Image (tube, rainbow, N blue to C red):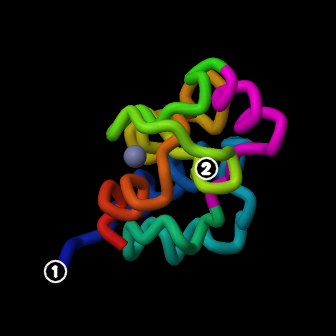
Amino acid sequence: MIEKYDTGKIEKESAKLILDDDVTKKSGIYPYILTRDEKYLSIRGFSDAMKQKVYEKQKGNCVVCKKHFEISEMEADHITPWHKGGKTTEENCQMLCKDDNRRKSGR
Ligand SMILES: [Zn+2]
């Protein structure tokens, strides 16, 4: 896909990303803007404390298949994806079993 890049827009977006606490790799901002591949930004993951709290809130059940799992068998997921404005916070965290998380992210 060939696009014309508007430098003003790029500057504005990169300034915003620099201030985003969830972007842990600031050197990845330009590659991200050019490719839209979030792997360049190393979006911050959920902390163990956040995962534990959400796990307890869900009573250990996966939100997709509703089955019970040990916390070690689950993975934290952004309810609203980061690129849609979702933050890496407890409120935006859900715990999925590994199978459902893999299905969701299409890995
Ligand atoms: Zn599940």
Question: Where residue 20 sits: x, y (%)?
Answer: 67, 43
Segment tinted magenta in the rendering: 43-56
Left or right of residue 69, residue 101 in this image: left
Left or right of residue 68, residue 42 in this image: right
Read off the residue under disc 1. Answer: 1
Residue neighbourhood size for the residue with mark 1, other residues' Cα within 10 Å, grouped as few (<14), some (14–19), many (≥20):
few
Q: Main secondary structure of the magenta part?
A: helix
Q: In the figure, 23 relative to 51: above or below?
A: below
User: How many numbered markers are drawn?
Assistant: 2
Q: In the picture, residue 49 is in which quadrant?
A: top right
- Spatial CA distance of label 1 from label 2 is 23 Å
CB under 8 Å between discs 1 and 2: no
Residue at horizontal 49 percent and vertical 69 percent from the top: 32
Q: Amino acid at mark 2?
A: Leu
The disc label shown at residue 17, or none? 2
Residue at horizontal 49 percent and vertical 65 percent from the top: 38
Q: Amino acid at mark 1?
A: Met
Residue at horizontal 60 percent and vertical 23 percent from the top: 59
Tell me if residue 49 is in the magenta stretch. Answer: yes
Front residue of this view, candidates 66 and 91: 66
Callout 1: SS: loop
Front residue of this view, candidates 24 and 44: 44
